[in-house]
Amino acid sequence: MTSPALARVEKGQLCTGCGLCAAIAANVEMRMVAPGYLRPQATGPVTPDEDRAIAAACPALVVDEGDRPRPPIDDAIWGPSYFTGTGFSTDAALRHQASSGGVLSGLLVHALASGLVDFVVQTGADPYLPTANLTHATANRDEVFAAAGSRYAPSAPLAQLEEWLARPGRFAFVGKPCDVTALRARARHDPRIDAKVPLMLAFFCAGIPSSAGTGRILKRLGVEPQDLAGFRYRGDGWPGFATATRHDGTAERMSYADSWGDILSKEVQFRCKICPDAIGNVADIACADAWYGDERGYPSFEEQDGRSLVIARTPVGAALLKEAVAAGRIEKAPLDIREIDKMQPAQARRKRQILSRLAAMAVAGRPVPRYRGLQLWAAAAQDKPLAQAKSFAGLLRRLMQGRA
């Protein structure tokens, strides 16, 4: 049979590209489709049981955080927190290699060294296609180091979930918020996940650009794809540069403001524009750029030593952070949660306007995902009515014109 769940995802352009459906259904695989997004493709029948499993966990269809524990701080915009602060890896090379201070990488190194996990499932550059991503297992500091840094390209880290679960030992999972959401949802029906994955980490996500966006960066840099030996989207400093390295060793680079702000941000897939949790609410720890403000109060992208925003969202995450600090791998300082409004204004605006965008989808006749336990009404109440009206009208117009 065909999959009603996947048909609904396709009709609404709701796919996040996480790959969970490919792990659940034997006849589903992830393929790149124009203009450069990973999408599920059925190669044969999907059984009713597989379809029900997809419908229960696919983040394109449902994001249900109603059953998660509620810590003392559970902010309508920034979510649950047992600790909110800034920090950086004390490994200077790792801090420089990473995109924003290296706290996630430092925590992974500590989790491996302490024996909490035996390996880490994380995404890095594909050695055969440097602009693309490859999810693989890392098992030591040097391998974590090699995978450090943001990768603004499609990835489907859950497509290989069965492979990771079958591998001996326990592992940490690092992914986009939607990846972690999908893994948590799947764990409700697959007890192997809680037994095998004691740690789930996420990073704030501004959306997944198409691979065509990366092509536009290469074109502007004047680098031919066949000449490309390596490609970094960020890192090697904070925020770092988009850097294309040729086989002859020469390199071209572009600032983060230009690569993300002028190109990649305009290539983000539709589902990311209605994401109710781009900040990793159900991860044990979520990290982001702890941008400093410029003289106008906007985040500054001047090059400097990296600094991570760190939110421990579960007791497991708070304990790991405490242990990593005690071991000397991480330095941290507390931060008032309202300071994040200044560091991540685009994330705050998106959360406040999710309900207006969902309303536009409903009016346009699009399938609407089911979101629960995300305090969307409380977030919307923080926005001005005029801003909500513009958000609704803008998306409705694009949907009706076929431009969403």
Image (spheres, helix red, strand yellow):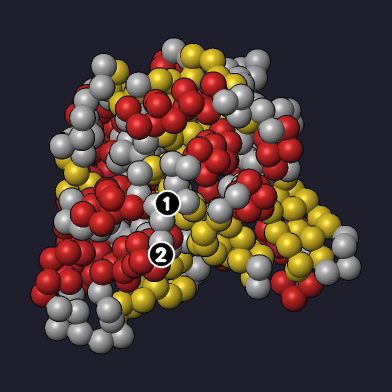
Residue annotated with mark 2: 167
Task: Examine the rendered structure and indicate whether residue 338 appears above or below residue 315.
Answer: above
Quarter of the C terminus within the rendering: bottom left
Front residue (pair 221, 108): 108
Q: Residue 131 falls in which quadrant of the image?
A: bottom right
Q: Is residue 56 left or right of residue 99?
A: left
**To which quarter of the image does residue 223 belong?**
bottom right
Asked if residue 296 can be seen in this view, the reply is: yes
- Towards the viewer: 402 or 139: 139
Q: Which residue is identified by label 1? A: 171
Q: Residue at x 61, y 60 (%)?
A: 125
- What amino acid type should be assigned to the residue bearing mark 2? Arg
Tell me the quadrant of the picture where the N terminus can be found.
bottom left
Determine the secondary structure under disc 1.
strand
In the rendering, at what x and y percent does residue 344 appear? 48, 29
For label 1, count other residues whose C-alpha is less than 10 Å away and answer few (under 14), some (14-19) or many (20+): many
Marks 2,1: beta carbons within 8 A: yes
